[in-house]
Amino acid sequence: MSRNTATAERGQGTGNRGPASIACLAFVALLSLAFWAGALWIVQQIMGLMPLG
């Protein structure tokens, strides 16, 4: 029995992978920036509660 053409053509669509890859990297960079901004904010809040002295 021959292969299904829908699954056979699926592997050939690598031409549009560039923009999707760049968008994925940008999204990951945005998530990491948001994570570290939140972590710094939490540290600043904790440092504000503790008396230095």
Image (spheres, rainbow, N blue to C red):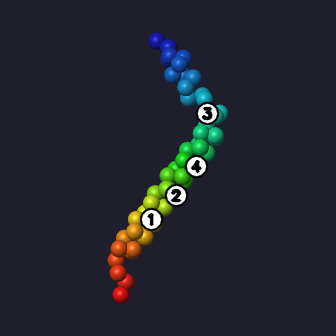
* Image depth: mark 2 or mark 1 in front: 1
Q: Quick one: label 1, few (<14), some, or many (20+) residues within 10 Å?
A: few
Secondary element at tag 1? helix
Query: Residue 49: horizontal and vertical position, in percent?
Result: 35, 74
Q: Earlier in the sequence, mark 3 or mark 4?
A: 3
Labelled pair 2, 3 in contact (Cβ < 8 Å)? no
How much space separates mark 3 and mark 4, taking CA atoms? 20 Å
Pointer 4: what residue? Answer: 26
Query: Which residue is at the front of the view, 4 or 50?
Result: 50
Amino acid type at image mark 4 = Ala
* Image depth: mark 3 or mark 4 in front: 4
Pointer 1: what residue? Answer: 41
Secondary element at tag 2? helix
Query: Which residue occupies 46% across, 57% down?
Result: 35
Amino acid type at image mark 2 = Leu
* Image depth: mark 1 or mark 4 in front: 1
Secondary element at tag 3? loop
Total marks shown come to 4
The label shown at residue 25 is none
How much space separates mark 2 and mark 4, taking CA atoms? 10 Å
Query: Could you say which quadrant of the image residue 5 lies in?
Result: top right
The label shown at residue 14 is 3
Amino acid type at image mark 1 = Trp
Note whether 26 is above or below 9 in the view shown: below
Query: Which residue occupies 48% across, 61% down?
Result: 37
How much space separates mark 1 and mark 3, taking CA atoms? 41 Å
Q: Earlier in the sequence, mark 2 or mark 1?
A: 2
Pointer 2: what residue? Answer: 33
